Image (spheres, helix red, strand yellow):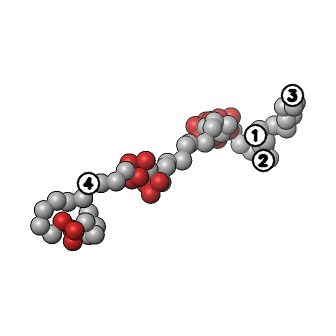
Amino acid sequence: MSEPDERPVLRIINGDATAEEVAAVVAVFAALGGGAEPPRRRTPEWSAPHRKVRVTLPHGRGGWRSSGLPR
């Protein structure tokens, strides 16, 4: 197992910050959720499984012509 990083996650450079200001910055970073797994990517529509199924060709008069037209 690797050892955890010993560096601080947050370091205050300017000592003029009040406790309330530091608490506000920490609350914002905590709300951002650093360390959680990233959101899952959506599957592109062009590779969706329902697009691989053939549609039924139109029947009747002019069916061959309407089969080539976009839906």
Q: CA distance from mark 1 to mark 4?
A: 61 Å
In the figure, is residue 70 to the left or right of 48? left
The residue tagged with tag 3: helix, strand or loop? loop
Q: Position of residue 12 (x, y in %)?
A: 77, 43
The vertical placement of 63 against 21, above or below, is below
Q: Which residue is mark 1?
A: 10
| Other residues around mark 4 within 10 Å, as few (<14) / some (14–19) / many (≥20) | few
Q: CA distance from mark 3 to mark 2?
A: 36 Å
Could you tell me the amino acid type at mark 1?
Leu
Q: Are marks 1 and 4 in contact (CB under 8 Å)?
A: no
**In the depicted view, which residue is nearer to us: 9 or 39?**
39
**In the depicted view, which residue is nearer to us: 58 or 49?**
58
Q: Give the image quarter of residue 34.
A: top right
The residue tagged with tag 1: helix, strand or loop? loop
Could you tell me the amino acid type at mark 4?
Thr
- Please tell me whether mark 1 or mark 2 is closer to you in this view: 1
Could you tell me the amino acid type at mark 3?
Met
Q: Earlier in the sequence, mark 1 or mark 3?
A: 3
**In the depicted view, which residue is nearer to us: 34 or 43?**
43
Q: Which residue is mark 2?
A: 14
Q: Which residue is mark 4?
A: 56
Q: Which residue is mark 3?
A: 1
